[in-house]
Amino acid sequence: MQETFEKVIKHDELFHDEVLPRLKKVEEVQEDFRLEMAEFRVEIGKITASQTSLELTVMKDGQQTRDLLGKFVDHYFSTDDKKLVTKEKVTMRRLSRTEKIILGFFAILGGSGGVIAGVITIMEKFQ
């Protein structure tokens, strides 16, 4: 019975000397972690509020910009109620056969699309 009592005392000493200090450290670390998590929740709440505020500010700014641009475009291009007046009159006219041949000759000399222009010139000449 003495041996059993000694084992209980030895286990009690081991428990108080080794297990309790370790358990205390684990509890301290756990408490520190809990406090950090609480701080993170507060910070996340602040960030979320700031993001919402920023989104509203950007949306308001964008609306103001669109309104100003709309007014500018309406003022600058205020041709809806007015007729456009041109100072020069542009006329279209058909080219004569000689003018087409000359134009084709210069197109051949120009290089770009020269073969096609040459064929067109030859076709015009034989018509």
Image (tube, rainbow, N blue to C red):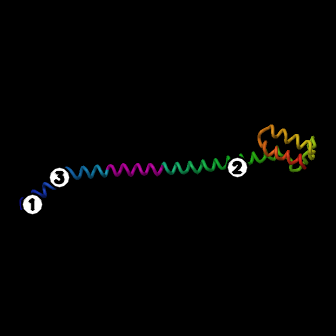
SS state under label 2: helix
Locate residue 7 relative to residue 60 in the image: left or right. Answer: left
Query: From the viewer's perspective, is the residue at label 1 or at label 2 nearer?
Result: 2
Locate residue 47 relative to residue 109 in the image: left or right. Answer: left
Give the residue pinned by disc 3: 14
Give the residue pinned by disc 1: 4
- Upstream in the sequence, badge 3 or badge 2? 3
**Magenta residue span:** 28-42
Task: From the top left corner, tell me how far across and down residue 113 is, in percent.
Answer: 77, 43
- Residue that protrudes farthest toward the bottom in the picture: 1
The residue type indicated by label 2 comes to Gln
Instruction: Assign the N terminus to one quadrant of the image.
Output: bottom left
Q: Is residue 108 above or below residue 17?
A: above
Q: Nearer the viewer, residue 27 or 60?
A: 60
The residue type indicated by label 3 comes to Leu
The residue shown at (45%, 49%) is 40
Give the residue pinned by disc 2: 63
Q: Nearer the viewer, residue 127 or 85?
A: 127
Residue 84 among those drawn in magenta: no
Query: From the viewer's perspective, is the residue at label 3 or at label 2 nearer?
Result: 2
Task: From the top left corner, tell me how far across and down residue 122 is, in percent.
Answer: 85, 45
Q: CA gap, disc 3 to disc 2?
A: 72 Å
Task: From the top left corner, tell me how far across and down residue 30 is, in percent.
Answer: 34, 52
